[in-house]
Amino acid sequence: MKLVRATPQAIGEAAAVIRKGGLVAFPTETVYGLGADAMNSLAVARIFEAKNRPRFDPLIVHIADPSSITKLCSVVDSRAAKLTERFWPGPLTLVLPKTQVVPDVVTAGLASVAVRMPSHTVALELIRQAGTPIAAPSANPFGYLSPTTAQHVEEQIGEKVDFILDGGKCTIGIESTIIDLTGKEPVVLRPGGLAIEEIEKVIGKVTISSARWQRPLSPGQLPRHYSPRTPVKIVADEPAEIINGTRAGLLAFKSVKEKLPYEVVEVLSPAGDLREAAANFFSCLHRLDGAGLDIIYAEAVPDTGLGKAIMDRLHKAAGKRDTRQNLPKTIGD
Ligand code: TXA
Ligand code: MG
């Protein structure tokens, strides 16, 4: 890990790290972000590993030019146009329908993507020089407060990142306001650095999502997590018994040796690497879900590192009780 003052040269080095699939912690006007190339699934999986999150959460994609939004979002309506015109760059994140180019691991399988153009010059220069949008959550480990200085980042997850750009203290110090524009009514998913009143001056009355924010201390309140429509059953590594006439698919952890009795098999990681498995997880599940199957059998993966987040997702897809209720209460995610 390298902690350096964000000189033009250091930003250039950090941008090279991003391009190579590494992790860079960088300052924004709100909080420090833990960034990776948003177009590189494997690099994005490393973010979850570093945050030590026992689950996948959709990430915010940071851009350096408002026009990049059209590459990432398939619909940019007049509300979005007005808001970006008025508040970008700045502490406002828009959730909009995503385009094909956004990897599923970035959005945790959702059909929407969160996008923001930060106003911090270091963040903007990093994104420009990397030449790619940067996916970044706040640079804190699961359960800790968001970092507002490079030293916070170093203390909290220093050994897990390749590069920390020190741009001093964040001026706003709380996360961006997130507004969901995928529906008819705009919904604030997270109050943050931009006052809701300011937003309402531009697009009129907005509602505030109660699902997530009335009980901010319980993790994973996000109501719109992707879940497959096809029933999912978790199995140990032996092939499951398949009832005659049932169209069954398998979500395998590693490459499968024998010919198995499934219509479709998706392999998360041929070599059994959890980071690769995490990077592929949502797209594999999407493909299986779209294959017209009656049931998806999913192999359990090792319950360590990113395997915990995969298992958390699998349990939810299988309709089990929310496994996260056993997790410690958290003040940040
Ligand atoms: O100020 C900020 O927003 C900071 C800086 C680094 O930009 N980032 C940040 O990221 O706070 P994070 O990952 O800690 O919080 C992102 C929030 C999460 O609550 C996530 O659930 C939500 O954004 N989110 C991301 N994509 C979403 C989507 N497609 N739909 C709904 N919520 C989404
Ligand atoms: Mg956070």
Image (tube, grey):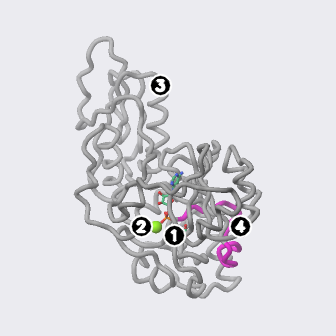
286 on left or right of 101: left
Task: Judge the density around disc 3: few (<14), some (14-19), many (≥20) Cα neighbours within 10 Å.
Answer: some
Task: Give the labeled residue for mark 2.
Answer: 50
Task: Judge the density around disc 4: few (<14), some (14-19), many (≥20) Cα neighbours within 10 Å.
Answer: some
Q: Which residues are magenta?
A: 119-136
Q: CA distance from mark 4 to mark 1?
A: 20 Å
Evaluate if marks 2 and 3 touch, with contact meaning CB atoms under 8 Å apart.
no
Image quarter for residue 15?
bottom right
Task: Give the labeled residue for mark 1.
Answer: 34
For residue 291, which numbered disc appears in the image? 3
Q: Is residue 210 magenta?
A: no
Secondary element at image label 1: strand
Evaluate if marks 2 and 4 touch, with contact meaning CB atoms under 8 Å apart.
no
Q: Amino acid at mark 3?
A: Ala
Q: Is mark 1 within 8 Å of ligand 1?
A: yes
Q: Nearer the viewer, residue 210 or 308?
A: 210
Question: Mark 4 against mark 1, which lies toward the viewer?
Answer: 4
